[in-house]
Image (tube, rainbow, N blue to C red):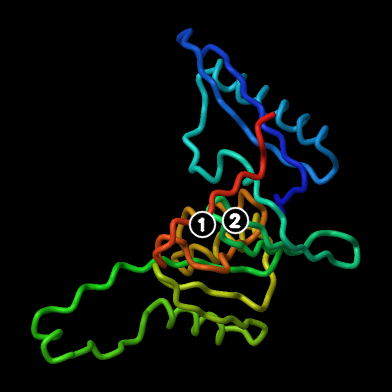
Amino acid sequence: MKVARYWARRSCTTDDENGYPVTRTVLRGSDISLADAEHQAKLACDQISQNIRAGFEPDWYEYDRQTKPEPIEREWFNEAGVRIAAITTNRHGIPVLNTASLAFVDVDLPPKKKPGFLAKMFNKKDAPADDPNIAALRSWVRGNNTRSARIYRTAAGLRYHITSPTFDPESADTARLMEHFNADPRYARLCKHQKCFRARLAPKPWRIGCAGISVNAVKDR
């Protein structure tokens, strides 16, 4: 899990292959010490500078750019002392559950159509239909008696909580699971990069009419 107690920020500027200066800023974390976090940030800057000079810099999704510097609010460890779960606070002030092997799958659904004039007049609601996504989850669970799952509605779609078996976020099995359930590809990439599964424990502020709280886990020195 890429969850850390100490964080360091470092900026680097180097000329690209065309001689134009390029500046990048990275954040790196460590559970060992602040000095180790600073060392990791330096190594990352050195690698980025090398990539820029060579004309190669991946077009990463925001989460792929760096580990997220989120304060740890609560954490759990196994008998070997390895962190297996943690609740962190993201940049919007929302608590997020991070799990090392308990899988969550986020599935986005098309936005619902607004009811027409007649439906509003007569308060007519569409009859519920079997959701193919839910049917796919049920079929997957019934396909093996070692599988179990829970399903939740979210503002944008569905969230599957795979209670059994456990999964490695970086494994090919997890990639196949995400693809099988048509998971949000950005979420799938996030899990692989962060080496954990993530689930928000509160709604996004703007969905409930709040401005949110800005959280800065790393202060400029």
SS under mark 2: helix
Whether 99 is drawn above or below 10: the answer is below
Mark on residue 191?
Answer: 2
Above or below for 56 versus 71: above
Horizontal side, residue 205 vs residue 51: left or right: left
Q: Quadrant of the C terminus?
A: top right
Residue at image location 77% in from the left, 42% down from the top? 6
Residue 37 location, x and y as percent? 77, 36
In the displayed orientation, state which residue is furthest to the top.
19
Residue 58 horizontal side relative to residue 5, left or right: left
Image mark for residue 187: 1
Q: Residues within 10 Å of mark 2 (few under 14, many from 20)?
A: many
Amino acid type indicated by mark 1: Tyr
Q: Of 128 and 220, which appears nearest the observer?
A: 220
* Image side of residue 214 versus residue 45, left or right: left
Residue at (77% x, 63% y) in the render: 75
Tags 2 and 1 touching, CB below 8 Å:
yes
Q: Residue at x 59, y 81 (%)?
A: 149
Question: Residue 113 is drawn in which quadrant?
Answer: bottom left
Question: Residue 26: image x %, image y %?
Answer: 62, 32
Number of residues whose C-alpha sits closer than 10 Å to that of mark 1, classed few (under 14), some (14–19) or many (20 or more): some
Outermost residue toward the left in this view: 118
Q: Where, by quadrant of the figure, is residue 108 drawn? A: bottom left
Number of numbered discs = 2
| Quadrant location of the N terminus in the rendered image | bottom right
Give the residue drawn at x 75%, y 48%.
Answer: 4
Amino acid type shown at disc 2: Cys
The vertical placement of 46 against 137, above or below, is: above
